[in-house]
Amino acid sequence: MKFTSALAMLASLTTAIATSTFTPIKPPSQPLAVRSPYLSTWQPAGSGGGNGGYLAGQWPSFWNGRTLGWQGLIRVDGTTYNFMGDMSGLSNLVTQTNYEYTATQSIYTQTVNNAIKLTVTFLSPITPDDWKRQSLVFSYMNLSVESIDGNTHTVQVYSDISAEWVSGNSNNIAQWEYGTASDDVVYHQIFRQTQEAWTEISDQTEFGNWYWATTSQSGYSYQNGEDSVVRAQFINSGSLANTQDTNYRAISNSWPVFAHAFDLGSVGTSSVSRVFSIGLCQDEPIQYTTSSGVVPQTSLYLDYFNTQLDALSFFQTDYATAYELSSALDAQLQEDSVNANGENYAILTTLGLRHAFGGIQWTGTEESPLVWLKEISSDGNMNTVDVIFPAHPAYIYTNATILKLLLDPLFQNQEAGLYPNTYSMHDIGAHYPNATGYPAGNDEAMPLEESGNMIIMTLMYYAITKDTSYLEQHYKLLSQWAEYLVADALIPANQASTDDFEGALANQTNLAIKGIVGIQAMSVIANLTGNTADASNYSSIASDYVTQWIGFANATTDELPHLTLNYGNSSTWSLLYNAYADKALNLGIIPQSIYDQQSEFYPSVLEAFGIPVDTRHQWSKSDWQVWTAATANEPTRQDMIDAVATWAAATSEWLPFGDLYETQTGAYVYQFANRPVQGGLLAVLVANMGLIV
Ligand SMILES: *[C@@H]1O[C@H](CO)[C@@H](O)[C@H](O)[C@H]1NC(C)=O
Ligand SMILES: *[C@@H]1O[C@H](CO)[C@@H](O)[C@H](O)[C@H]1NC(C)=O
Ligand SMILES: *[C@@H]1O[C@H](CO)[C@@H](O)[C@H](O)[C@H]1NC(C)=O
Ligand SMILES: *[C@@H]1O[C@H](CO)[C@@H](O)[C@H](O)[C@H]1NC(C)=O
Ligand SMILES: *[C@@H]1O[C@H](CO)[C@@H](O)[C@H](O)[C@H]1NC(C)=O
Ligand SMILES: *[C@@H]1O[C@H](CO)[C@@H](O)[C@H](O)[C@H]1NC(C)=O
Ligand SMILES: *[C@@H]1O[C@H](CO)[C@@H](O)[C@H](O)[C@H]1NC(C)=O
Ligand SMILES: *[C@@H]1O[C@H](CO)[C@@H](O)[C@H](O)[C@H]1NC(C)=O
């Protein structure tokens, strides 16, 4: 079948249904404030549950779909319009003319009564090389207004948040405080009255302080109190009462909201803007089991700032720099992606990077940081090896040291003797934010999967940094895992791979090649650390295994040659995404004839929205398709990328960018949403780097 580009398909859709355009596409959900597993606020867009991609007239939500009150109002010449959120009793909505996303921004262009243009920019910074900024769990909203009809207009703007941000259960009691920090930064601080450290309700965090801030300047006013009261105050007068309601109560009891407003006075053709910050401060966000027991981990931002308010003031006054750094990253990613595989590829990478960075959180000090990842939406495991693995191209592309910081806790735990199995552990804790390990070894068993992943990712990190000491430091454990691969990779026992939703199976072709590539990677690690006897031993084992593997895995009966899903079943096939590290690191262990054969085969199993992971279901994974595309020859690579981009634009799903979906209907499977694995969409960029080890 022939594929229309996602852009062309979208253009025809949008002219039919709405006045807003969407650049480059309308993603399932539009990122508003997305910086960590807990600051993850989105605007549902897909028609299945969203309003079609408009900021006004629908509540934003947490990544899992739960409403987070965030209301925006603009008053022009005395008439109030809703530019964001879904408050009741106000039917005037602004007119949205365009929505655009980049890797770090969502930009809504709106007009009010054909008189005023309102541009709302949501910036969730990504600064991979600047850990001071990266440590802050905060996002920006910038409101910019200008006249578009040649006249001046009096304009006031308003925005509030509800207390829904502080707990996953609206019966819980919220408390709050209004105050002024340095540099005229004014803020509402909102928190759960009963702090429950390290706990979650429906994935929302139940401790820490939320801040909703702006900079006080002429025309500023504030208020907190019941939603209808505070909003009516603005609608009626264009300013707030500068009063506080100290009747702390349940989140849903006369819904308290926390508002800022600005009277911008008379606005002409030069634009006037105001910047707001939203974020979360948790001093000790993580619990981590080390040899000395369970140790709370201090947030990295506290290494740079003495207090939460110092951090808040820095962030609020740093917009220009954060915008510049993030825009530079946006431009670089866009350009690299277009150069690699065109606009359709950029659709995916610019959407994917945010998930890789929105799923992590930083603790420790500048000298000794750690990075924690949540396996969002599947089960909440922490630093899951087979989630870091698909995501890792995003960290390799931006700053490979972040990958090391994600792997460090896994190495530390196992090297401290806190895990009894000889293969690699699956994750560092059954539920975020408790990195309490598995002293009984009872984690989800994916022995071949995770042992191969750890060795391969360690070498990937080395390929960028040339950090030989890291290889030396972990040589013993890496060798132990390599022994496991030698024993199990060629004839894999009946076990789950990372695609555990497909079920367990013996002799999986793709799992076997991960193990074999892992043995070859271990050979390189051995050589780099002066263990030359080990190097030649592992290398000859890997070569011998590859030859045998081709014999076991190559289908014998089909017309179109291909590898099977499992040995000996010629009617099966799967995406051979585990060949990726061989390509990306130029290991040369898999013969080119295999890549050529698979590149010829894949188009024959391409569905409307992509190629299924394997013959067991019509399901596919966005990340594995792009990984596989990175191993394929053109034009197969481009066709595979186009299909995933077409899906992202066409699906009616509305939870943030799922990675597991049905390739014929486009529906999500198991509602996998907002997962860090979307960092894998950058796989082609890393494969194009020409890494040599
Ligand atoms: C990542 O950023 C840190 C902090 O700036 C820097 O020290 C490190 O060298 C960077 N790593 C890579 C691989 O660029
Ligand atoms: C807010 O965004 C507008 C563009 O929409 C820009 O002109 C303005 O400078 C930004 N505000 C600040 C304070 O940087
Ligand atoms: C983390 O551990 C604490 C006990 O230290 C427990 O109260 C909390 O419920 C756990 N959190 C999760 C998300 O399981
Ligand atoms: C796995 O493949 C090997 C080699 O073809 C074969 O000997 C063995 O019986 C297979 N195991 C299973 C469980 O199918
Ligand atoms: C070890 O590295 C050297 C230098 O790059 C290379 O010549 C040799 O073939 C490598 N040995 C193995 C076993 O990979
Ligand atoms: C090569 O590695 C295998 C598997 O680890 C081991 O059994 C064998 O003794 C090694 N051979 C040499 C010569 O080191
Ligand atoms: C796989 O088997 C087919 C025959 O079914 C053959 O044409 C092809 O060359 C084999 N591929 C490889 C890489 O050996
Ligand atoms: C071969 O694969 C097909 C498709 O998955 C399956 O229905 C069949 O049972 C498999 N046959 C064997 C012998 O495993």
Image (cartoon, rainbow, N blue to C red):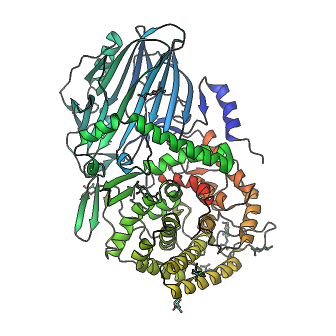
Residue at x 67%, y 73% (from the top left corner): 590
Please identify the quarter of the rendering in which residue 384 is found: bottom left
Name the one closer to the observer, 128 or 379.
128
Furthest toward the right, the residue is 559
Residue 46 in the image, given as x and y percentages of width and height? 55, 36
Please identify the quarter of the rendering in which residue 163 is found: top left
Furthest toward the left, the residue is 246
Q: Quadrant of the C terminus?
A: bottom right
Residue 95 in the image, given as x and y percentages of width and height? 53, 19
Residue at x 33%, y 20% (from the top left corner): 261
Residue 506 in the image, given as x and y percentages of width and height? 58, 75
Residue at x 53%, y 57% (from the top left corner): 393
Residue 493 in view (yes/no)? no
Name the one closer to the observer, 230 or 115.
115
Please identify the quarter of the rendering in which residue 272 is found: top left
Residue 300 in the image, given as x and y percentages of width and height? 30, 52
Vertical position of residue 671 compared to residue 513: above or below: above
Residue 340 in view (yes/no)? yes
Vertical position of residue 614 compared to residue 310: above or below: below
Name the one closer to the observer, 75 or 1.
75
Figure label count: 0
